[in-house]
Amino acid sequence: MQKLFCAILFVCFSITAISQNKSFNIGYLLDRTSPEIEGLLDELTKEISAVTGEDATLNFPSSSQLVNNFNTQLALQHYNTLLNNDTDIIIAFGVVNNAVISKIGSYSKPTIMFGALSEELIDTERIEQKIENYTSITTSQSYAEDLRTFQQLVNPSKVGVVIEKAFIENLPLAETFLEIDRELDIETKLIPFDNLNDITSNLDEIDGVYLAGGFYLSDAEMKTLAEVFIEKKLPSFTANPAKDVDNGILATNHDQSEMNQFFRRIALTVEAVVNGEDLSRLTSKLESKGQLTINFNTAERIDMPLKYSLIATTTFIGDPDIIAADRTYDLVGVMKEAIAKNLDLQTIEQDIRLTEKDVQVAKSDYLPNVTAGATGSYIDPELAAVANGSNPEVSTSGNITLQQTLFSESANANISIQKSLRAAQEENYNSEALNTVFNTATAYFTALILKANLKIQAQNLELTKYNLKIAEENYEAGQSGKADVLRFRSELAQNTQEFVEAINQLEQGYYQLNQLLNNPINTKIDVEDAELKTGIYSNYNYEQLGQFLDDPKLREPFVKFLIQEAINNAPELKALQYNLDATERSERLFGAGRFLPTLALQGQYNYEFSRSGAGSAFLPGFEQPEGYYTVGLSVSLPLFNQNKQNLNKQIASIQKEQLEISQDNIRLGIEKNINDAVLELVNQISNIQLSEVFEASAKETLDLTQTSYANGAVNIVQLIDAQNNYLQAQLASANATYNYLQSSMQLERSLGLFFLLQDNTEREAFVQRFLEFTQTLND
């Protein structure tokens, strides 16, 4: 009997509870709508439903969502419509709705006004009035504070203030901005708009744009507007949340957390109405605690340098990988351009030209030597008189002399030596070209590593800010001490410095690349990412190279083949061989070559132009012709030249021995370099695989540690360790592929070739030589 009584009592209580679960219809009044506004409205609806929970059944009929399109008469009409239909709670948003509904004075249905207003426009006395069935929820922002931050960023002299025409018609904006102009010593120009053209056609004579309105613009419209500002190099600042910055606007002081706070307060107010609380006591003003947010890519595109003093308190949006570059390079393009434009290579090219001239000078020993001369003489008359006409007192004459070497061992040797030295210089150029290509590839991969580092440091800085927020919340909740907050502030300062250094290091990386490419140092360049299986790397078998080296059975014969190829290709060995050829030629010259005679042909033609004075006449019968010639053949043979021939031969022999020792040393160095490069590649193959595991584990550990710290389960040291561990894991993972490709470049430099600069025929020939080499080993 007692159990039956309890069951009946439970049913009665359940029926009573069900009967108390009331139903409420909620209507929305808006100034303007768009897909983005509809999305925000859905978020607000979900928040209201979640907060109210089972206290009541809430309905949001679409017929009670009315838009006035900035029409004051229509706004009043819509409000009356909701008063006269079955709407129970009215939620109104927008400047026009606020201007119309706030003046009504008495409200028969619960009416919640909400919106974002600048502090300069808020009527504090009006907000604090206690009006039955009416509350106003306002989140404050400040036009003056926004413009002050804008000044710190770019210091514009004249700012265009973009705002809807309806706002200007309903708010004292002109007077407000005149006061702000005086306060900040800045000039503003109001740009009222109904459409985008109203904005884009009024951007003359300004050097900055402040979006005091624009909340109702769609994402597509905001992106279009931002692109116009960027093309005109106009810095922009918005009074709207950070979504505008996502769409390309430069900066804002308002983040998404303000919107979330706003929605939560509206939801709590609806819950209060459902629970029967007095609405007039819920009037509230939400203080804006936003943080500066900057679009990194927009700043880059408008050439705005970031002020490092703002970094610690700034959230960055955008991808550091996206750079507004004058030119973007891939690795092959960098390598080819370095060969064509590098100044060090151009210097060595001039050395080659000089050696070509040395060869021409050496060959010129076999060219005829023709000289012309003229003589005028005066002789003592008494001596001339007795010379019988052979030496007149006054005479003038001229001659042309020809000398032609027919055979000279020293000339032959010099020609041969200079040709060898020219060939050696060409090999020096090839060696320097390989070094330049390798240095350029190194600079390329360094830039990629620095780009990855900048991106990761930016993420780590944001992570520290997030962890600081958790620490502050825990401190306010009494779950942790102030020491945690101070520790994360210290971490924030350190991470900010690391972020600044990452920015500057990337700039230095681009400077280095510009120098190698003979670009102006400040040229804005970017480098394309490098992945093993995509782009230019997909056809060059870098993965197959890794497979050869990863297999111990294939590695040994492959390394032997690589050493053989490197020795055959090495321009350093070829240059030494040419120098050795030149030395051996010198040795032969000073050996048996010294006994070879030098043959030369000589000829001269003489002509007497005039003679006069004493002794100018010949004796009768002894007339001398006015012109005559002589021809002769000379043979010379050095018999003893102060023992210099023997000494020079000995010097040449010593130089030859020195060059042979250098060859052996270079061969040994090549063998070592190949083995070192192979081992480094093996290390990097392992690093690629392990770094992926390391990063995934570190990320999962960090997520778990963050959750545990927020719940007070772990201390700050464990959280910081987890964050630092994740940072190192990210860096290792991001750089693994770059380090592998860089090690491949080192191996190719030791080989004396670069696969990326070869055509398919050359690469196939390389594979064929390897197959032939392995066949030889098997035989």
Image: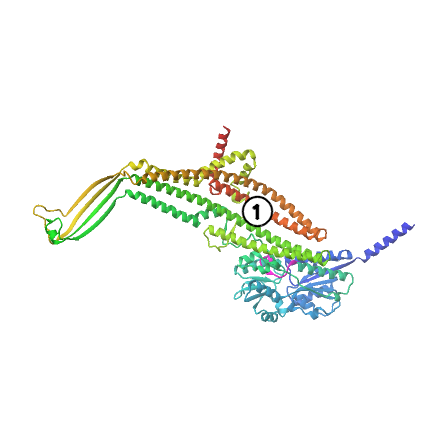
Report if residue 596 is visible in the image.
yes
Which is nearer the eye, 211 or 330? 330
Q: Is residue 69 left or right of residue 442?
A: right
Q: Position of residue 200 (x, y in %)?
A: 54, 62
Which kind of residue does numbered mark 1 sit on? Asn
Q: How many numbered marks have been drawn onto this rendered protein structure?
A: 1
Which is nearer the eye, 650 or 504? 650
Q: Secondary structure at mark 1?
A: helix
Image quarter of residue 238: bottom right
Q: Position of residue 271 (x, y in %)?
A: 75, 60
Q: Position of residue 585 (x, y in %)?
A: 35, 38
Whether residue 248 appears in magenta in the rendering, the answer is yes
Q: Is residue 586 left or right of residue 458?
A: left
The structure residue drawn at horizontal position 81% and vertical position 55%, both measured from the top left corner, is 18
The colour scheme is rainbow
**As drawn, which residue projects farthest toward the left?**
620
Which is nearer the eye, 621 or 293? 621
Report if residue 103 is visible in the image.
no
Which is nearer the eye, 222 or 378? 378
Circle 1 packing at 10 Å, graded few (<14), some (14-19), many (20+), is many
Whether residue 99 appears in magenta in the rendering, the answer is no
**As drawn, which residue projects farthest toward the top?**
779
**As drawn, which residue projects farthest toward the front?**
642
Q: Which residue is tagged 1? A: 735
Q: Position of residue 176 (x, y in %)?
A: 61, 70
Q: Which residues are magenta?
A: 245-256
